[in-house]
Image (tube, rainbow, N blue to C red):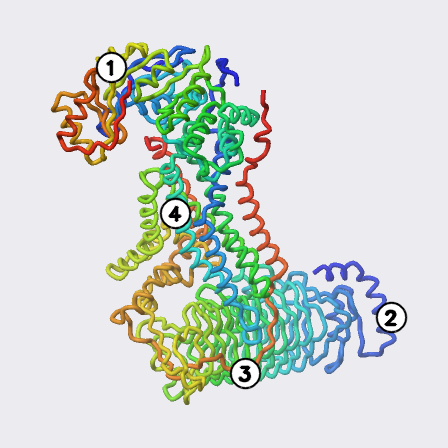
C-alpha cells in the first residue's frame, strides 16, 4: 500500500531524512519510532506530499509527488498539532472537510459517532478540550474511510484516560486492507498497537522489527524520562553523554536509556551536575 | 463504522479544479465576515465615505445642485489610502495567519492542490473586498441620495469598480507576501511597508526626481502609472474629468500621446498587477515547503 | 425631428387649407408650401408686409431682401434639405418669428446656417426653433439685432466640426436674451459693441460665450454648463459679468470664465461651480491705471477656484466665497498673487479652509488667511509635479510643510480680513442638474445588496444536513 524508496529530505542544508526505504502492506500497522528530531513527522509530510522530497513514494501504487491530490485522497491524517478553524463547530469542521474532499455529507454523523463526539457536534472547536480536539482530528481523518491512516503522535498530548481511549479507538480501526502508520517516541505505546516498528534516528532507518524485539535490538530495557527546565536540557545531554549514558532530548526534558537494574544512576548523575529534576518517569 | 476498505477506483483529478476553489473561497469569505479588522475597515471606509458626502452637500440657494465632482474626488483620495491598506494587510495576514494557526495543514492534507488553496483564498478575499468597497460606495451614494445631493449613479459605480480592481492588485501583492514570509507578524510588517511604498514613497520619490533632474514628462508618466495606486487615481480622474488635462504638462503629454487610451492603460496596469502578483504568489506558494 | 417628419406627410392637405385661408385673409397673408413657394411669396410681398406661415413644410434656401415680417403659426417648418443656409437675410428690419428652421447644409467653410444675414440692422429673431443646423444664426452688420427666446440645437457632429449656435459679427447694440443653445460649438460675439447677453442657457458646447473685441457688453443671468469653456472674454473693455452660473465647464484647458486682455471689468454675483478652473485671468486688466472688482461671487467645488496668470495684478477680490475648491487660488507660475487685493476696505473673502478664529465675533477672522501650500508652490516651480495633484503624497507634502515651518513657502496670497461666514449673496435661478435621485438610490442600494449577497455567500450552509447523516 505504501512504498518508500531512497527518501531524502533536507530543510535548507539540514538533512532530516536520509535515504529511507520501507514499505507497508495492506492490513498492516506500523510505527515510526524514534526520539524527537529523528525525522518521523517529516516522513509523514512527505507521504502526504506536503513538502518536496527526493526519492520515490507510492501510495496505493500512485506516485505521491506527481499525483499528490490522488494520494492525499487515500490518506486520512491526524497531525500532532491540530489546526482547526476555532469559530467553526465540530459538525461544520467536518462539513468543510467533506466539501473539500467532494464527498457527500452523509458520513459526518457516522464519524462523529465513531469518535464519540455526539454531544459536542454543535460546539465550536475553540471550546473543545485537548482530548476532544484529538478525537475531532480522528473524525476528520476517518471521514473518507481511507485505506491509509497516518497518525502523528496521536497520544502525546493526552492524559492517561484519554490515551487509553485513543489506543482502543486506534485498535478498532485496524482492518484487513487498511494501513495504519503511527509515529511515536514511546516504546510502550508502540508495542500495543502495531505489527512492526521502524526505528528512526537522525533520519536513518536503524532498526526494523516486531515491537517485542525493539527493546532488545536497542539493548535497552527501559527509558528514563526526566523533566528538566528547558534551558538546562542541552547541558544535561552533554553531561549525561560524558558519563556514558545514551541520552536524547525529548519534550520537556531528556530521555535516557537505562538498564533495569540501575535506573537510579542516571538521576544521580544529573543530581551531581546540579540539574533541577522537576519530575521523572520510567518508560518501558 | 466499517473497517473494510475497498481500493477506490479513482480517476486522476486535475491539479486545478473549481470545486475546492469555491469551497475555500466561501470559507475565506466566512472568515472575513467574522474578522473584526475587516469590519473595522469596512465601517471606517463607509463612515468616511458617508461623511465626505454629507459635508459636501452645498447650500442650494448659493450654488444650486453642483458638487458631486469634488465629492467624488475626495472619495478617490480616500480610496487611495484605505483600499490598498485594507487589501494588502488582508492578503498578507490571511495565508500567514493560516500557517500560524495550523489550519493551512488542515487544508493541505485534503486532496486539494496548493494552487487551489491559493486561488480559493484569492477569490474569497476578492469577494470580501468587493463587499467592503460596495458598502463604502453604497453608503456614500445612499447619503447623497437621502440628502438630495447631486450624484451621478454611473460615476458612482465606475469608481466602485475601479476601487475593487485596485483592491485585487493589492490582494495579489498581499498574498505574494503571505506565501513567501514565515510568520503573520512579518507579513503584516511587509504589507505596511508596501503600502507606504505604493501610496507615499513611490510618488515622493518621483517628485524628488522631478525636482532634482527635471525628468521628461514621458518618463514621469510611465514611472507613475505603473504604480497600481496611481493607475487607479488616473483612471478615476479620467472617469471624473474625462481627461488628465488638469494634471499639468505630464497630463497634457498623456492626453496627446494616448488620448482616450489612458483609462485603458491604467486599467491594464491594475489587471497586470493582479495577474502577475497572483501568478507569482501561486508559484511561490507551490514551491514552498511552508505549511 | 419626429414632429418634422410628421409634418412632411401632409404637405398637400396643408397647402390646400392654407390656400383657402389665404383667399379669405386678405393680401398680406400668403401660402407657399409648394416647391419654391415660400421664395415666391417673399418675392411678391411688399416691403413692410407680414408674411404668415401656416403649419406645413416650406422649402428653405430662401433669401429675404426687403424689410419683412415672417411669422409662423403652429410651428411651420422651413426645411433647408441639407443644402446651404436655410434663410438668408440681406435687408434691414426683418423679423422672423415662430418658425422651425431645419436642416441646413453642413459645410463649415461655407458657414451654412439656419439664418445667415448681412447688412441687416434691427433684425429680430424671436421664438424660433433651430434644428439640425450647422450654425444657428450668423449675423453680420446687424446693429441693434434682437435675438430672443430661440431654441437652438446643433448637428450631431464632432465638436470641432460643428458650427456656432449664435455668431454675431460687427453688430453693435444687439440684445441676446432667453435663448437656449445646446450642442453647438461656440456662441461668438466679435466686434460687437454695447451688446446685452442675458438669461441665456448654453450647454454642451465648446465656448459657451466667446467675446472678441466687443466693448461695453453686459452679460448677466446666463447659465453656462458643461461647455469646454463657460465664457471667454478677449481683447474687450468695459464688461459687466453679473449673476451668471458657470457650472461643470471642464474641457481640456477649460475654464468657467476666462479673461484675456480685458480692461474695465466688473464681476459680481456669479456662481462658479465644479469647473476645472472657476475663473482664469491672463493680462487682465492690461492697463496699469485700472482695477477690476470681483465681488460677491461663489467659487465652489472647482479643481482650481481662481487661476491667475503670472503678471496679473490689480484685481480686487472682496466678499467672494471660496468653498472646497481642490486648490482655492493658484498662480500659473511662480511669483505669487500679491499684486492683487484679497480684501478691500476691511472686507475680505470667505475661505472654507480658513483655520483661524474670531474672538471678537465681528465676522472677520482675527488672523490673516494665507495660501502657502508647499505642494502648490512646488507645482508653480516644477509644473510637472501637478501630475500628483490629489495624491496622498501631495497631501503629505503639505502636511510636512505645515508641521515644519522651515519648509513653508512664502504665501502666494494674504487676505487680512477673511470672512468667517459665507457672505449673503442674492440667489440666482439655476436649473436642476440632470441627475435622478431615484437612480442614485437604486445604484446605492444595489451596491449594498451586492455586498450583503457576497457576505451571505460565505455562510456556506455548513449547518445543513449535518448530524442527520446515517447512523448504521
- Tell which subunit mark 3 falls on: C
Residue B182, x across and y down, in percent: 31, 38
Query: With respect to residue B26, does B236 lie above or below?
Result: below
Check if mark 3 and mark 4 are on a common chain: no
Q: Earlier in the sequence, mark 2 or mark 3?
A: 2
Left or right of residue A213: residue C426 = right
- Tell which subunit mark 1 falls on: A
Q: Nearer the viewer, residue A266 or C145?
A: A266
User: Few, some or many C-alpha atoms within 10 Å of disc 1 (few <14, some 14-19, many ≥20)?
Assistant: some
Cα separation, mark 4 vs mark 1, equals 57 Å
User: Few, some or many C-alpha atoms within 10 Å of disc 4 (few <14, some 14-19, many ≥20)?
Assistant: many
Cα separation, mark 1 vs mark 2, equals 134 Å
Check if mark 2 and mark 3 are on a common chain: yes
Residue B59, x across and y down, in percent: 55, 73
Cα separation, mark 2 vs mark 3, equals 47 Å
Cα separation, mark 1 vs mark 3, equals 114 Å
Tag 1 secondary structure: loop
Q: Tell me the quarter of the picture where residue C49 sits.
A: bottom right
- Mark 1 = which residue? A221
- Mark 2 = which residue? C20
- Mark 4 = which residue? B88
**Residue at position x 51%, y 24% in the image:** A111
3 vs 4, front mark: 4
Q: Nearer the viewer, residue A185 or B262?
A: A185
Left or right of residue C112: residue B47 = left
Marks 1 & 3, CB-CB < 8 Å contact:
no
- Tell which subunit mark 2 falls on: C
Amino acid at each position: 500500500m505504501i512504498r518508500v524508496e531512497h527518501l531524502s529530505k533536507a530543510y535548507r542544508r539540514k538533512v532530516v531524512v536520509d535515504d529511507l526505504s520501507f514499505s507497508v502492506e495492506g492490513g498492516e500497522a506500523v510505527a515510526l519510532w524514534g526520539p524527537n528530531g529523528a525525522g518521523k513527522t517529516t516522513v509523514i509530510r512527505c507521504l502526504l506530499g506536503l513538502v518536496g522530497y527526493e526519492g520515490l513514494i507510492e501510495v496505493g501504487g500512485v506516485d505521491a509527488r506527481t499525483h499528490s491530490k490522488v494520494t492525499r485522497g487515500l490518506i486520512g491524517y491526524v497531525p500532532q498539532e491540530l489546526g482547526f478553524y476555532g469559530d467553526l463547530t465540530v459538525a461544520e469542521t467536518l462539513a468543510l472537510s467533506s466539501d473539500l474532499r467532494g464527498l457527500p455529507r452523509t458520513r459526518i454523523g457516522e464519524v462523529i459517532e465513531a469518535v464519540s463526539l455526539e454531544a459536542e457536534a454543535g460546539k465550536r472547536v475553540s471550546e473543545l478540550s485537548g482530548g476532544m480536539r484529538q478525537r475531532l482530528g480522528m473524525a476528520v481523518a476517518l471521514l473518507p474511510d481511507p485505506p491509509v491512516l497516518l497518525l502523528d503522535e496521536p497520544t502525546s498530548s493526552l492524559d492517561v484516560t484519554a490515551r487509553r481511549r485513543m489506543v482502543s479507538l486506534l485498535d478498532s480501526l485496524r482492518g484487513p486492507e487498511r494501513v495504519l502508520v503511527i509515529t511515536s517516541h514511546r516504546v510502550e505505546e508502540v508495542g500495543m498497537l502495531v505489527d512492526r516498528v521502524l526505528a528512526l534516528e537522525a533520519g536513518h532507518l536503524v532498526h526494523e522489527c516486531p515491537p517485542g524485539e525493539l527493546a532488545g535490538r536497542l539493548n535497552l530495557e527501559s527509558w528514563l524520562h526526566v523533566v528538566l527546565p528547558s534551558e538546562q536540557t542541552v547541558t544535561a545531554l552533554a553531561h549525561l553523554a560524558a558519563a556514558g549514558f545514551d541520552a536524547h532530548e525529548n519534550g520537556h526534558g531528556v530521555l535516557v536509556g537505562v538498564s533495569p537494574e540501575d535506573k537510579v544512576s542516571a538521576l544521580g548523575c544529573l543530581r551531581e551536575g546540579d540539574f533541577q529534576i522537576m519530575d521523572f518517569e520510567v518508560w518501558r | 463504522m466499517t473497517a473494510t476498505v475497498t481500493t477506490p477506483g479513482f480517476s486522476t483529478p486535475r491539479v486545478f479544479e473549481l470545486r475546492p476553489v469555491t469551497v475555500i473561497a466561501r470559507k475565506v469569505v466566512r472568515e472575513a465576515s467574522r474578522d473584526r479588522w475587516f469590519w473595522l475597515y469596512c465601517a471606517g471606509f463607509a463612515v468616511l465615505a458617508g461623511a465626505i458626502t454629507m459635508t459636501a452637500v452645498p447650500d442650494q440657494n448659493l450654488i444650486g445642485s453642483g458638487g458631486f465632482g469634488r465629492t467624488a474626488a475626495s472619495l478617490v483620495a480616500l480610496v487611495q489610502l484605505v483600499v490598498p491598506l485594507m487589501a494588502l494587510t488582508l492578503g498578507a495576514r490571511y495565508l500567514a495567519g493560516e500557517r500560524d494557526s495550523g489550519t493551512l495543514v488542515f487544508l493541505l492534507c485534503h486532496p486539494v492542490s496548493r494552487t487551489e488553496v491559493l486561488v480559493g483564498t484569492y477569490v474569497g478575499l476578492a469577494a470580501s473586498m468587493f463587499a467592503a468597497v460596495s458598502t463604502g460606495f453604497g453608503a456614500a451614494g445612499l447619503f447623497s441620495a437621502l440628502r438630495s445631493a447631486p450624484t451621478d449613479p454611473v460615476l458612482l459605480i465606475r469608481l466602485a469598480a475601479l476601487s475593487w480592481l485596485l483592491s485585487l492588485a493589492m490582494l495579489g501583492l498581499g498574498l505574494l507576501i503571505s506565501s513567501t514570509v514565515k510568520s503573520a507578524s512579518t507579513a503584516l510588517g511587509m504589507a505596511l511597508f508596501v503600502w507606504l511604498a505604493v501610496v507615499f514613497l513611490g510618488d515622493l520619490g518621483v517628485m524628488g526626481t522631478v525636482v532634482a533632474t527635471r525628468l521628461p514628462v514621458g518618463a514621469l508618466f510611465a514611472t507613475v502609472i505603473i504604480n497600481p495606486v496611481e493607475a487607479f487615481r488616473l483612471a478615476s480622474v479620467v472617469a471624473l474629468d474625462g481627461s488628465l488635462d488638469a494634471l499639468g504638462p505630464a497630463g497634457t503629454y498623456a492626453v496627446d500621446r494616448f488620448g482616450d487610451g489612458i483609462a485603458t492603460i491604467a486599467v491594464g496596469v491594475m489587471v497586470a498587477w493582479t495577474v502577475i502578483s497572483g501568478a507569482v504568489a501561486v508559484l511561490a506558494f507551490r514551491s514552498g515547503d511552508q505549511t | 425631428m419626429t414632429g418634422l417628419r410628421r409634418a412632411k406627410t401632409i404637405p398637400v392637405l396643408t397647402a390646400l387649407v392654407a390656400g383657402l385661408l389665404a383667399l379669405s385673409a386678405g393680401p398680406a397673408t400668403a401660402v407657399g408650401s409648394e416647391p419654391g413657394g415660400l421664395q415666391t411669396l417673399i418675392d411678391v410681398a411688399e416691403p413692410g408686409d407680414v408674411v404668415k406661415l401656416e403649419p406645413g413644410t416650406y422649402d428653405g434656401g430662401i433669401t429675404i431682401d426687403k424689410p419683412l415680417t415672417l411669422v409662423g403659426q403652429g410651428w411651420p417648418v422651413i426645411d433647408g434639405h441639407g443644402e446651404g443656409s436655410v434663410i438668408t437675410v440681406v435687408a434691414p428690419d426683418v423679423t422672423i418669428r415662430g418658425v422651425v428652421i431645419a436642416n441646413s447644409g453642413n459645410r463649415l467653410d461655407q458657414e451654412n446656417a439656419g439664418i445667415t444675414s448681412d447688412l441687416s440692422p434691427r433684425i429680430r429673431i424671436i421664438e424660433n426653433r433651430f434644428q439640425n443646423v450647422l450654425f444657428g444664426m450668423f449675423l453680420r452688420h446687424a446693429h441693434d439685432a434682437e435675438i430672443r427666446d430661440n431654441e437652438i440645437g446643433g448637428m450631431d457632429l464632432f465638436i470641432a466640426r460643428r458650427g456656432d449656435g449664435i455668431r454675431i459679427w460687427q453688430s453693435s447694440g444687439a440684445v441676446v436674451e432667453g435663448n437656449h443653445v445646446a450642442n453647438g460649438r461656440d456662441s461668438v460675439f466679435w466686434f460687437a459693441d454695447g451688446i446685452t447677453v442675458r438669461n441665456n442657457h448654453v450647454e454642451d458646447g465648446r465656448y459657451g460665450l466667446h467675446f472678441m473685441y466687443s466693448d461695453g457688453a453686459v452679460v448677466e443671468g446666463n447659465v453656462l454648463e458643461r461647455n469646454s469653456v463657460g465664457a471667454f472674454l478677449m481683447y474687450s473693455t468695459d464688461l459687466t459679468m453679473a449673476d451668471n452660473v458657470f457650472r461643470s465647464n471642464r474641457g481640456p484647458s477649460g475654464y468657467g470664465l476666462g479673461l484675456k486682455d480685458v480692461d474695465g471689468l466688473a464681476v459680481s454675483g456669479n456662481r462658479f461651480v465644479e469647473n476645472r478652473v472657476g475663473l482664469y485671468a491672463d493680462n487682465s486688466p492690461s492697463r496699469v491705471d485700472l482695477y477690476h472688482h470681483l465681488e460677491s461671487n461663489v467659487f465652489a467645488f472647482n479643481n482650481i477656484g481662481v487661476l491667475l496668470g503670472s503678471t496679473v495684478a490689480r484685481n480686487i477680490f472682496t466678499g467672494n466665497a471660496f468653498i472646497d475648491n481642490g486648490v482655492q487660488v493658484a498662480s500659473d507660475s511662480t511669483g505669487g498673487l500679491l499684486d492683487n487685493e484679497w480684501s478691500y476696505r476691511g472686507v475680505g473673502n470667505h475661505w472654507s479652509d480658513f483655520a483661524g478664529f474670531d474672538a471678537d465675533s465681528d465676522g472677520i477672522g482675527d488672523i490673516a488667511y494665507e495660501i502657502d501650500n508647499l505642494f502648490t508652490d512646488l507645482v508653480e516651480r516644477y509644473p510637472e509635479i501637478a501630475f500628483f495633484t490629489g495624491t496622498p503624497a501631495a497631501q503629505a507634502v503639505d502636511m510636512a510643510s505645515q508641521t515644519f515651518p522651515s519648509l513653508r513657502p512664502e504665501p502666494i496670497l494674504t487676505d487680512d480680513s477673511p470672512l468667517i461666514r459665507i457672505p449673503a449673496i442674492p440667489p440666482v435661478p439655476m436649473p436642476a442638474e440632470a441627475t435622478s435621485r431615484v437612480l442614485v438610490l437604486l445604484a446605492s442600494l444595489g451596491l449594498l445588496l451586492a455586498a450583503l449577497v457576497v457576505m451571505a455567500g460565505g455562510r456556506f450552509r455548513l449547518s445543513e444536513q449535518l448530524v442527520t447523516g446515517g447512523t448504521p
